Image (cartoon, rainbow, N blue to C red):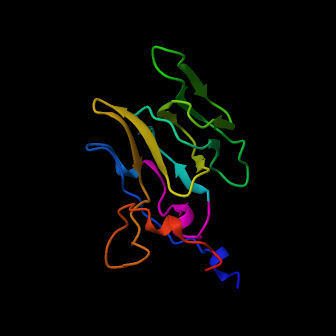
Amino acid sequence: MYEKLVFEFPKENNEVVAEGDDPGFVIKPQAYFRGASQIPGSNFNVGFQIFVKPFFLDRDQHRHSEDEYLIFLGGSFPNVFDFDADIEFTLGKPGVDAELFKINKPTIIRVPAGVYHCPLNFKRVDKPVFFQASLMQPMFGGIYDTKDGEVEMKYNGPVPCKYNEAKRCDSCGKCLTEDWKS
């Protein structure tokens, strides 16, 4: 009866980097929970990564329709307070209310729904950094201001489609309509 509520993490080797960037910025494999496509009805997405090199993770300012939480801890387990990195993160809209935060110790940031945020830049990483981004919606995505207006983009990772394992998920959203009870 409850088997749809249990999900075993597959190993992922997410290679999404900007052209010319070093793909060795993070230890592989990584783990992600991709929300409603993996547990029907879920309103939660989370990724688990350990950064080992500087990396400009997210250059584009955006916002979400739900809250997001960003967690930065030392990645030398079990001592998560063994932190030696410099990370820059912007909250707010540039030219309006943007504030740059410099992260150099274990930190959690709440990004309320609708608040603009990013860039996120891991500028110096002398010891591994455990990074977790948790978004309280059924599929990862953001709302971006483009020259053509506001655009919501969704991304479910390089995973197979839930309905056709021969193709990669294209974030169509069909899986978001499932209920765990059916």
Coordinates of residue 164 in the picture (x, y in percent): 36, 78
Q: Residue at x 36, y 52 (%)?
A: 16
Is 44 located above or below residue 160 in the figure? above
Q: Which residues are magenta?
A: 25-42
Coordinates of residue 126 in the picture (x, y in percent): 54, 38
Is 3 located above or below residue 179 in the figure? below
Q: Nearer the viewer, residue 95 or 114?
A: 114
Is 154 located above or below residue 11 in the figure? above
Q: Quadrant of the C terminus?
A: bottom right
In reply to whether residue 23 is colored magenta, the answer given is: no
Q: Residue at x 50, y 69 (%)?
A: 11
In reply to whether residue 27 is colored magenta, the answer given is: yes
Coordinates of residue 54 in the picture (x, y in percent): 45, 38
Q: Nearer the viewer, residue 160 or 15?
A: 160
Give the left or right position of residue 109, taking residue 91 as reference: right
Residue 48 falls in image quadrant? bottom right
Please identify the dominant SS of the magenta region. Answer: loop
Residue 149 falls in image quadrant? top left
Q: Nearer the viewer, residue 133 or 151?
A: 151
Coordinates of residue 66 in the picture (x, y in percent): 59, 44
Is 15 located above or below residue 106 in the figure? below
Give the left or right position of residue 37, taking residue 134 as reference: left
Q: Residue at x 47, y 61 (%)?
A: 28
Give the left or right position of residue 10, taking residue 163 as reference: right
The total number of labels drawn is 0
Q: Residue furthest bottom?
A: 1
